[in-house]
Image (cartoon, grey):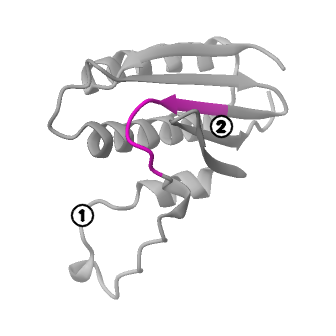
Amino acid sequence: MGPAFQRTILADFRSLHQLQRDLVVFLETQGVPPKASHDVQVVCEELIVNAIRHGVGSRTGADHRIELSVALADAITIRICDDLPLFDPTSVPLPVRPISLADATVGGRGLTLVRRATTLFRWQAANGRNLIVAEVPCGQR
């Protein structure tokens, strides 16, 4: 395993914004290619936003934590663990493709982006916590 980025944040959007900035700096300083960096950022953002939006909802996230680990090797391994209500995002079916733009709904495409960006996307309940493991191809460094 190569260099790794690890952070634990409160399950709220303010904490997520700082996490995103720190992740960008890490990926840039490690020389991660632009496409891989973009894909890692999209995967992390979509999965953490979904956890906060659906797991915390209107309640405060101060009592909940989200742990992120991004490890660099031949592929970039993303691990997200949280203590929010158990939910398997890998079981969510793909959205039905709209017939026209007028028929399209707003939202609901984040997990599709995650699936397209990853070569591995797995969830498990680990000691009453959600654990997601995803891999993004690294490309050339």
Give residue 37's quadrant in the image.
Answer: top right
Q: Secondary structure at mark 2?
A: helix
Q: Position of residue 92 (x, y in %)?
A: 47, 64
Q: Is residue 23 above or below residue 45?
A: above
Decide if residue 121 is on the left or right side of residue 97. Answer: right
| Amino acid, disc 2 | Ala
Q: Position of residue 98 (x, y in %)?
A: 35, 82
The residue that appears at 65% across and 49% down in the rendered structure is 122
Considering depth in this image, is 83 or 94 the residue closer to the camera?
Answer: 83
| Amino acid, disc 1 | Val
The label shown at residue 95 is none
Give residue 47's quadrant in the image.
Answer: top left
Queried whether the magenta region covers residue 79, the answer comes back as: yes
The residue that appears at 41% across and 80% down in the rendered structure is 97
Return the residue found at the far front. Answer: 127
Q: Position of residue 76 (x, y in %)?
A: 72, 33
Quadrant where the image shows the N terminus: top right
Mark 2 vs mark 1: give the one in front: 1
The residue that appears at 45% across and 50% down in the rendered structure is 87
Residue placed under numbered mark 2 in the picture: 36
The label shown at residue 106 is 1
Q: Position of residue 19 (x, y in %)?
A: 42, 18
- Rate crowding at label 2 as few (under 14), some (14 to 19) or many (20 or more) other CA atoms within 10 Å: many
Considering depth in this image, is 68 or 33 the residue closer to the camera?
Answer: 68
Q: Which residues are magenta?
A: 78-87
Decide if residue 128 is on the left or right side of residue 117. Answer: left
The residue that appears at 69% across and 31% down in the rendered structure is 33
- Rate crowding at label 1 as few (under 14), some (14 to 19) or many (20 or more) other CA atoms within 10 Å: few
Considering depth in this image, is 89 or 87 the residue closer to the camera?
Answer: 87
**Circle nearer the N terminus (2, 1):** 2
